[in-house]
Image: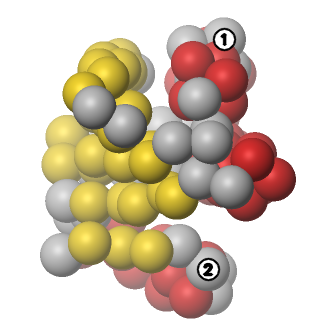
Amino acid sequence: MNINITEESNTITAVFDGRLDTLAAQQISETIEPLLQHADQNIVLDCEKMPFISSSGLRIFLKIRKEVAAKGGKMYLKNICPDVRQVFKMTKLEDIFEILD
């Protein structure tokens, strides 16, 4: 799992590349720190290159969402593949994240 984080204007974009399984979730905990530090801005999580997400990966997304809510920013998910979208539907998390099509 690789994450490429870029900043443009008032938006931080993180492109997730690879499977966000339990091992990857543990490894990226430090990588997402810039997202947490800038949670008062717009955060976009681009999932186009992420074919899988585990419950540990969902916890990472929830951690970012919690920080964004606390700091008054906005968080968006985009380019979610059908398999990952199904995980969000099954866990009812589709309702609490703003997903851009």
Residue placed most toward the observer, 39 or 88: 39
Please give the label number shown on residue 49. none
Quarter of the figure with residue 12: top left
Q: Which residue is mark 1?
A: 30
Q: Quadrant of the C terminus?
A: bottom left
Question: How many numbered marks appear?
Answer: 2
Answer with left or right where residue 58 lies relative to residue 80.
right
- Image position, residue 42 (x, y; %): 44, 48
Write the residue at 59% across / 29% down: 38
Q: Quadrant of the N terminus?
A: top left
Write the residue at 52% across / 58% down: 74
Please, what is the three-letter code of the amino acid marked with disc 1?
Glu
- Image position, residue 69 (x, y; %): 73, 59
**Residue 44, visible in the rendered structure:** yes
Write the residue at 18% across / 48% down: 48
- Image position, residue 51 (x, y; %): 28, 49
- Vertical relation: 59 (above or below) 23: below
Write the residue at 40% across / 79% down: 86
How is this picture coloured?
secondary structure
Answer with left or right where residue 42 lies relative to residue 64.
left
Q: Secondary structure at mark 2?
A: loop
Q: Which residue is mark 2?
A: 96
Q: Secondary structure at mark 1?
A: loop
Q: Residue furthest right?
A: 70
Please, what is the three-letter code of the amino acid marked with disc 2?
Ile
- Mark 1: few/some/many CA within 10 Å (<14, 14-19, 20+): few
Disc 1 versus disc 2: distance between alpha carbons? 24 Å
Residue placed most toward the observer, 84 or 79: 79
Tell me which label, 1 or 2, sits earlier in the chain. 1
